[in-house]
Amino acid sequence: MSDTLLRTLDLVEPGDLVLYHGSKAEHHGFYLARLCDCFYCGRADHLGSADTRYHLTDPFAEDPDACVVHHVRRASITRSAANA
């Protein structure tokens, strides 16, 4: 898929910079989004859930793989324009 199409559809690809604006107000801000590969999200996928979940990591942390927010719904994040 081309980058232009992804920006048009506002799709989130793994590794994209996103803005989290979900229910956990103390975590609002910019993160790197990756597909959540935990047991619960994997089970939901296996059972046919169409709601993709992400885990968010701090792009400025010493350990960029340290997860900050788990099980984030697609509706709780917005793809950043910095990905363009």
Image (cartoon, grey):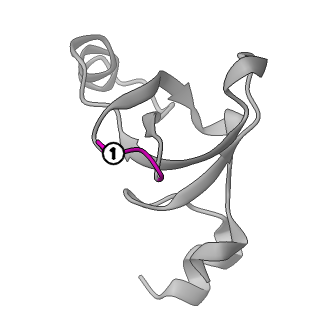
| Residue sitting nearer the eye, 60 or 7 | 60
Q: How many marks?
A: 1
Q: Nearer the viewer, residue 46 or 23?
A: 23
Quadrant of res 46: top left
Q: Secondary structure at mark 1?
A: loop
Examine the structure image and report whether residue 65 is included in the region drawn in magenta: no
Question: Magenta stretch?
Answer: 60-64
Q: Position of residue 48 (x, y in %)?
A: 35, 24
Assign the N terminus to one quadrant of the image. Answer: bottom left
Answer left or right for 69 relative to 21. Answer: left
Amino acid type at mark 1: Glu
Question: What residue is at 66 percent from the left and 69 percent from the top?
Answer: 9
Q: Which residue is mark 1?
A: 62
Q: Position of residue 10 (x, y in %)?
A: 66, 64
Q: Residue at x 46, y 52 (%)?
A: 59
Residue 72 picture location, percent across and down: 54, 27
| Residue 53 left/right relative to 73 | left
